[in-house]
Amino acid sequence: MVVTSPSRDDYDVINEDLVIDFRGAQLRRGGNSLVGPLDWQVELDERWVILGPNGAGKTSLMRMAAANEFPSSGSCRILGELMGKTEVMELRTRIGLSSVALAQRIPGDEKVADIVISAGYSVLGRWREKYDGIDHERAADTLEAMGAEHLSERTWGTLSEGERKRVLISRALMTDPEMLLLDEPGAGLDLGGREELVSRLADLALDPDAPAVVLVTHHVEEIPQGFTHAMLLAEGEVTASGLIEDVITSENLTRTFAQNIVVEQADDGRFFARRSRPGRHRRAAL
Ligand SMILES: Nc1ncnc2c1ncn2[C@@H]1O[C@H](COP(=O)(O)OP(=O)(O)OP(=O)(O)O)[C@@H](O)[C@H]1O
């Protein structure tokens, strides 16, 4: 839930139900604000989607949530740890992350099984780390959960875009994370690949034992069933945030994307959006 301006005293008492607790968090570069200042609280059992136009600050927000950036001002508490007062390498092993930036750092000759298992050390690829049988089993299980077990001996460079996405999410799940951050997992997938991914993410979202999930996407069609909350961003600022049904509305999307957007929700809970073009049919009929 989003709360407004809590006192510092509240913040010093760690709320164990919160995986993310941002208070006035802002990320700035070169005098510009990339995102924030914003308040954001994510509870253990919540599944959030972040939407907004290109450049809205979604990835910047995720970088703070992944403990890859410290806030320039305000405070970020992640899994109970206060940024700036904690060992981030250790914290990162508790966070499952799938992002384009991570995908770009994987060498083409890296074996899929190694990409997944090396998440245990928050590194990419095998070097001198020691893994137990249980780690190998866990890697096989997470690949299987994403329907990618048959890829374990393949190299990264030989995978299709859809296969890569599934391997990245398997890696993100490897450490049994307390929070899963998925930055545009559907980008570049064809319709079948997107639907396959959305269905697997719905299974995850509906699993009561799964970690808290934050998903960044450009398309409301990619919001899996089971997602509970949403945040809309535009120009680094929150335009709407809260329960998904209250946030994913035509009015909020129109304001956020500065276009007349109509959104509909199907019986199965999936959202569909398009730009409305009033008068088009009438003109066509003339
Ligand atoms: N290191 C940086 N230095 C300066 N500006 C940056 C930096 N990183 C991002 N930005 C700018 O911050 C803004 C937000 O970027 P961000 O990548 O967070 O947006 P986004 O919502 O994820 O965009 P997209 O949907 O296009 O991926 C953009 O205007 C971007 O150009």
Image (spheres, grey):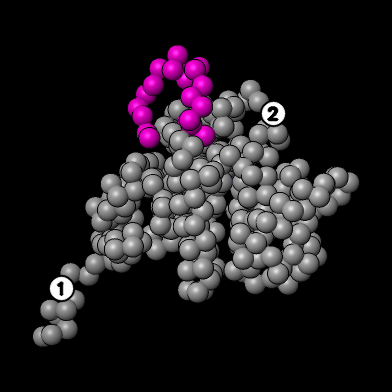
Q: Which residue is mark 2?
A: 87
Distance of label 2 from label 1 (alpha carbons): 58 Å
Q: Quadrant of the C terminus?
A: bottom left
Name the residue: 47% across, 69% down.
195
Furthest toward the bottom, the residue is 286
Residue 279 image label: 1
Side of 29 where 170 appears, left or right:
right
Rendering coords of residue 164 (x, y %): 65, 64
Q: How many marks?
A: 2
Q: Which mark is residue 4?
A: none
As drawn, the residue found furthest toward the right would be 128
Residue 50 at x, y percent in the picture: 43, 49
What residue is shown at x 62% (from left), y 42% (from top)?
A: 177
Q: Which residues are magenta?
A: 1-22
Q: Determine whether label 2 and label 1 are within 8 Å by CB.
A: no
Front in this rendered view, residue 235 or 22: 22
Q: Nearer the viewer, mark 2 or mark 1?
A: 2
Q: Crowding near pointer 2: few (<14 within 10 Å), some, many (20+)? A: few
- Would you call the spot at circle 1 few (<14 residues within 10 Å), some (14-19), or many (20 or more)? few
Q: Residue furthest left?
A: 286
Residue 82 is situated, as x and y percent measured from the top left of the image, at 58, 25
Residue 105 appears in the rendering = no
Q: Nearer the viewer, residue 256 or 159?
A: 159
Q: Amino acid at mark 1?
A: Gly
Q: Residue at x 44, y 28 (%)?
A: 24
Is residue 17 shown in magenta? yes
